[in-house]
């Protein structure tokens, strides 16, 4: 296993690295940095305002809009990291796949045969999403005064394949799971192409200025360990290995972008997932951080408050958040939700959560 998590980057000027990046590189920070998945989204009135005037693709493909949406939650809450607004589906249309959003992705012609998969092209890095590179540069410029780091992201090959074959979100994703069993050769070809695509998509983001990258494997948890080992692990590993050592610009000069892996509903896969060469594992709420730590020795854990907690009262939010913070004490921790924030969330509840996380002194709590 690559001992990636153990090398703090850059070697000098660590004290000036933003808290989020220090924790991502494995430092036990005095308090846990906090950002939340889907922090730019429909629970924010200012997001809905833009959404009322533009389609989802327009929002993704117009650099000024994507940068503006990225900054909305930073202006409102002052989180410890921003995540560039776009979608895991963004690199797929340049492969020759038509996608609409309603509100989740809908593939016009789901892929089911080897012939359809052979016809997919893998666009060059420059062709995939030039608008996203422009949005990253704009967002970085705007974030410079606060020093808030910017996260880039993409979908893991298996999760992208899940949508391409199933055609849309689904409870059981039965077409995709049958496809893996009946067309393994076609599945591997699709995953090969998506791996190359994901590498180019994420490299483009790091080169444009993304200071960390998160690979979303939202649907990995559908599978057993054997299937994950065959159809996910080798491809995820290749994506992460290709991103190792890539330099992005930072106020301290050049520095490497830490790699974050998110799998949802995947506690049964942790013994396999831990083999991935990445610095941070983002975990859902189904197991407590204290129980999970032993699967990922020496790595940073990110998570793992149940997003529905933010719909409860402020005292409940405080209690549950403190439980997560306590569970995160055994090593480096980045506070986040276990999955995306729900659209029904009152924004002031997130503001309260941020106060609770910031008030929690990890050094003091460790001595108790
Ligand atoms: O109606 C709307 O306003 C569109 C809703 C929406 C938003 C806000 C979609 C459609 N995508 C996004 C942005 C988005 N998607 C971000 C922005 C950055 C941020 O976190 O603030 C990110 C990181 C994503 C990632 C994404 N898209 C994932 C992985 C994360 C996850 O939730 O597991 C997935 C699976 C998608 C596909 C997708 N795009 C949109 C939706 C509603 C979905 C999920 C559909 C489904 O559940 O099957």
Image (spheres, rainbow, N blue to C red):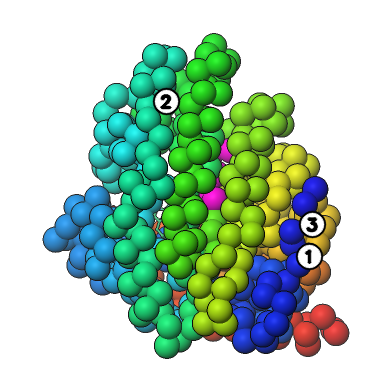
Residue at (66, 37) in percent of width and height: 233
Q: CA distance from mark 1 to mark 2?
A: 38 Å
Q: CA distance from mark 3 to mark 2?
A: 35 Å
Look at the numbered discs 3 and 2 and tell me whether their residues touch, using CB distance below 8 Å. Answer: no
Q: Which residue is mark 2?
A: 165
Element type at mark 1: helix
Q: Position of residue 301 (x, y in %)?
A: 69, 62
- Establish if 11 lies above or below 224: below
- Establish if 164 lies above or below 207: above
Q: Position of residue 119 (x, y in %)?
A: 36, 21
- Establish if 255 lies above or below 232: below
Q: Would you say 36 lies left or right of 74 here? A: right
Q: Position of residue 69 (x, y in %)?
A: 31, 68
Beta carbon of the mark 2 residue lies under 8 A of ligand 1: no
When asked about the image quadrant of residue 131, the answer is: bottom left
Q: Is residue 217 magenta?
A: yes
Q: CA distance from mark 1 to mark 3?
A: 6 Å
Q: Is residue 301 visible from the viewing direction of this image?
A: yes
Look at the numbered discs 1 and 3 and tell me whether their residues touch, using CB distance below 8 Å. Answer: yes
Q: Would you say 226 lies left or right of 78 here? A: right
Using the image as rendered, state which of residue 207 and residue 147 is in the foreground: 207
Quadrant where the C terminus sits is bottom right
Residue at (71, 27) in percent of width and height: 226
Residue at (20, 67) in percent of width and height: 49
Q: Would you say 124 lies left or right of 218 here? A: left
Q: Which residue is mark 3?
A: 3
Determine which of the numbered discs, if any, sits on residue 6 in the image: 1
Residue range (magenta): 215-220
Mark 2 burial class by Cα count in 10 Å: few <14, some 14-19, many 20+? many
User: Can you tell which of label 3 and label 2 is closer to the viewer?
Assistant: 3
Mark 3 burial class by Cα count in 10 Å: few <14, some 14-19, many 20+? few
Determine which of the numbered discs, if any, sits on residue 312 in the image: none
């Amino acid at each position: 296993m690559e001992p990636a998590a153990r090398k703090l980057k850059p070697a000098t000027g660590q004290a000036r690295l933003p808290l989020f990046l220090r924790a991502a590189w494995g430092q036990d920070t005095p308090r846990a940095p906090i950002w939340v998945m889907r922090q730019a989204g429909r629970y924010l009135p200012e997001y809905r305002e833009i959404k009322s005037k533009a389609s989802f693709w327009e929002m993704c493909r117009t650099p000024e809009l994507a940068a503006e949406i990225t900054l909305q939650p930073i202006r409102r809450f002052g989180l410890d990291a921003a995540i560039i607004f776009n979608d895991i589906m963004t690199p797929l249309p340049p492969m020759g796949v038509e996608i609409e959003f309603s509100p989740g992705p809908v593939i016009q012609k789901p892929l089911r045969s080897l012939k359809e998969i052979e016809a997919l092209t893998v666009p060059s890095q420059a062709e995939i999403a030039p608008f996203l590179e422009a949005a990253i540069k704009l967002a970085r410029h705007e974030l410079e005064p606060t020093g808030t780091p910017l996260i880039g992201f993409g979908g893991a090959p298996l999760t992208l394949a899940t949508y391409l074959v199933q055609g849309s979100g689904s409870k059981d994703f039965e077409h995709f799971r049958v496809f893996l069993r009946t067309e393994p050769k076609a599945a591997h070809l699709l995953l090969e192409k998506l791996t190359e695509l994901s590498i180019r998509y994420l490299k483009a983001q790091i080169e444009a200025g993304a200071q960390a990258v998160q690979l979303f494997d939202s649907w990995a948890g559908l599978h057993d360990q054997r299937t994950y080992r065959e159809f996910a692990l080798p491809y995820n590993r290749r994506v992460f290995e290709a991103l190792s050592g890539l330099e992005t610009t930072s106020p301290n000069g050049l520095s490497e972008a830490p790699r974050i892996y998110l799998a949802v509903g995947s506690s049964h896969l942790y013994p396999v997932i831990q083999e991935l060469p990445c610095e941070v594992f983002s975990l859902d709420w189904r197991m407590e951080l204290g129980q999970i730590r032993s699967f990922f020795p020496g790595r940073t854990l990110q998570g793992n408050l149940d997003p529905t907690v933010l719909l409860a009262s402020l005292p409940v939010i405080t209690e549950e958040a403190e439980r997560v913070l306590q569970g995160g004490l055994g090593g480096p921790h980045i506070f986040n939700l276990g999955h995306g924030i729900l659209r029904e969330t009152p924004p002031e509840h997130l503001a309260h959560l941020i106060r609770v996380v910031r008030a929690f002194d990890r050094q003091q709590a460790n001595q108790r």
